[in-house]
Amino acid sequence: MYLYTEDHRNLEIFRSTACLLGMPLFYLYVLAVCYSDFRLKWKHLVHLIPFIVTNLIFIPRIYLPIDEGSFASTLNQMSEIYFIQILIEFQYAFYMINVFLILKKYREIYLENYANPSTSTYKWLFQMTCVFLAAHSIVALKNIIRYSGFREVFLWANVLVGTIALFITCWFIMKALNHPELFRGVNSKLKLTKDILPEVEEKPESVNAQNDLINNQIAALKQYMIEKEPFLDPSLTIQELGNQINMPVRDLSILINHHINQHFFDFVNEYRIQKAMNILKDQSKSQLTVLEILYEVGFNSKSSFNTSFKKYTNVTPTAYRNAS
């Protein structure tokens, strides 16, 4: 490898600067997975700036001259190499912070607008981001060793980093193959309730009249949930519920997330758990398994059902049935 790079230094340097494309690609990937309507646009080319700037800086002293001596030793002493190492760390911190902010917003939008009890996409992306953060910490440590004079340790660090990269790649592919649902995002145009409220114009009615209207809407919504049981649909969204009760999704979002003070996700799951509790107490349905019950009330995952059930009752479904 070293003999080849000695004769093709420019190609090797250009290849090494491609690491500046890694975090922008990961950032765009997270956007694409989180938001179903994401599309690449010309404005996304701005993420190429660090890569382009670095290669322009490398032209005078690295790409053009033909230096004598060892390729590695002369290169590592150049200020441009220190520059790219520092730039990589700043770039990494910038994109990691933005990815975590995207995930935070995605989770909030999901909870306020979707009733599917599976938040696997968020968990998957969060896990993957944490794994990448841990892996990069090892890479950063390896780079510190690189300039500390411990050459033998540095070579073993390369082996460790390569092994970790292989593990992450295999893990990523297996997740994609076994869980295709991880790649279905939410609509990025959906707004959070906290963003909608300032836009709501003040109505001329008195405070009492507004409170009466809100209370009537809440009562009508709860009655509809009990009588029609729309929560039995595991993929129910706030848009679909709004269409069913003839209420604009904007108003319904404010009603549930602000006035009832619950996320749509929790609001719907509460009715699912209540129905599950009634079934578990019903002796005539004692032959039904917990798995059959969770599917019947609108859940599609045993783990999410158990988590939600324990959240509302402080006991597991099995323990609740035995105590009834």
Image (cartoon, helix red, strand yellow):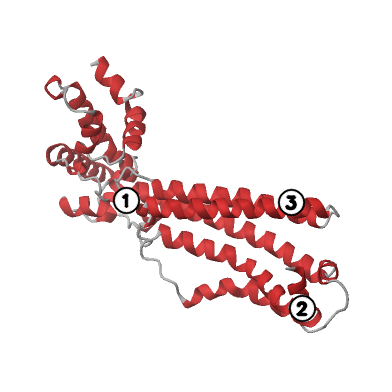
Q: Is residue 315 above or below residue 240?
A: above
Alpha carbons under labels 2 and 3: distance apart: 25 Å
Rendering coords of residue 304 (x, y %): 34, 37
Q: Amino acid at mark 1?
A: Asn
- Could you tell whether 268 is left or right of 150 in the image? left
Of labels 2 and 3, earlier in sequence is 2
Quadrant of res 271: top left
Front residue of 184/70: it is: 70
Which secondary structure lies at badge 1?
helix
Residue at image position (47%, 59%) is 30
Alpha carbons under labels 1 and 2: distance apart: 58 Å
Residue annotated with mark 3: 156
Quadrant of res 143: bottom right
Residue at image position (72%, 73%) is 13
Residue at image position (45%, 75%) is 41
Rendering coords of residue 91 (x, y %): 64, 62
Mark 3 or mark 1: which is in front?
3
Mark 1 or mark 2: which is in front?
2
Extreme residue in the top direction:
323
How many numbered callouts?
3
Q: Residues within 10 Å of mark 3 (few under 14, many from 20)?
A: few
> Does residue 276 show up?
yes
Q: Amino acid at mark 3?
A: Trp
- Could you tell whether 8 is left or right of 65 in the image? left
Residue annotated with mark 2: 7
Residue annotated with mark 1: 113
> Does residue 182 show up?
no
- Could you tell whether 182 is left or right of 324 in the image? right
Residue at image position (38%, 57%) is 183
Front residue of 316/46: it is: 316
